[in-house]
Amino acid sequence: MNGTGYILVVEDSRTQARQLEETLKPLGCSVSLAYNGKEALEVMRRERPTLVIADILMPELNGYQLCKIIKADDKLKDVPVVLITQLSDPPEIVRGMECGADDFIVKPYNEDFLLTRIQAILRIKVEEHEAAKEVVILVVEDSPTQAEHLKHILEQHEYQVSVAHDGREALVLLSQGRPRLVISDIVMPEMDGYEFAYEVKRDPELKKTPVILVTSLLDKKDIVRRASVVADGYFTKPFDDRYLVSKVESLLASSRREAEGDGDKINVSFAGEHYAIASGRRQILTFLLSIYENA
């Protein structure tokens, strides 16, 4: 594969696969061919493609199924998938959207039209990649070893990382420059993660900054307490590196959407104690997903 990445074409018709390979040559990318969904997954897991173009009607594993598997894989889910088919019924197109496809092209297609669509998708991926290099994530962790581990994981994905060793130091760094996301340990000296998250979320300038809490605590009351300080998610130690990166990407994507307005606190009784949940709708949803994924 060349330095510009490669496009994977998945088509059970060898004639059409080669024709599509020829059509894509003007893009300057290498093209690999797979003749069914299972073969495509084997190729992708050996070397991740820049983009996948897949026919829908294939034996063994059809295009919908292949797309669902790709989008459910933490290492592959951000690879754009374009589905190509002769089917043009609206329900079929909806199925393509439901499985997470990035685009849907109906045969027969104009070659220039196909190239324009593929170029647009590749351009967006390049822009997202470049934007990610400018994202600063603040890690708040009193353990130098664990702070360095988190920093290493994030820098591997080209995020810029700042490190604070407790909540008070983190607030000073936040006042000097706003990061796009914060990952904070809970048990720390000076100011713990709960108090720190509360201070972030009550600050009008910082409250929309996603905060992820990291802890080894498993008490269910403690989980509810996380919601009361409007954390956007949490991890229990030890955590899977891929899950961490996936959650970071998800929260960064959410933070780019339209900001929510502040709402009234929700009063909740749990295990004989009362809590005032100040989360907005986005925070509640992402928080509940964090609980589900950590169950």
Image (cartoon, rainbow, N blue to C red):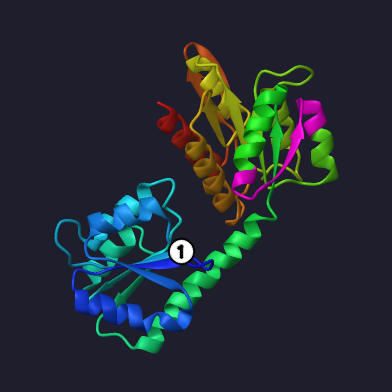
Q: Given the image, on which type of amino acid does mark 1 rest?
A: Thr
Quarter of the image for residue 83 reads: bottom left
- Judge by depth and name the residue closer to the eye, 273 or 229: 229
Q: Nearer the viewer, residue 123 or 232?
A: 123
How many dots with numbers?
1
Q: Position of residue 70 (x, y in %)?
A: 35, 53
- On the image, the x and y values in percent for residue 36 come to 21, 61
Extreme-left residue of the structure:
59
Instruction: Identify which residue is drawn at 59% across, 49% down.
Output: 252
For disc 1, the marked residue is: 50
Identify the secondary structure beneath mark 1.
loop
Is 202 in the magenta? no
Residue at 49% over, 76% down: 120
Over which residues does the magenta segment extend? Answer: 155-170
Q: Is residue 156 magenta?
A: yes
Compared to residue 187, the image places residue 5 above or below, namely below
Q: Quadrant of the C terminus?
A: top left
Percent of width and height locating residue 66: 27, 56
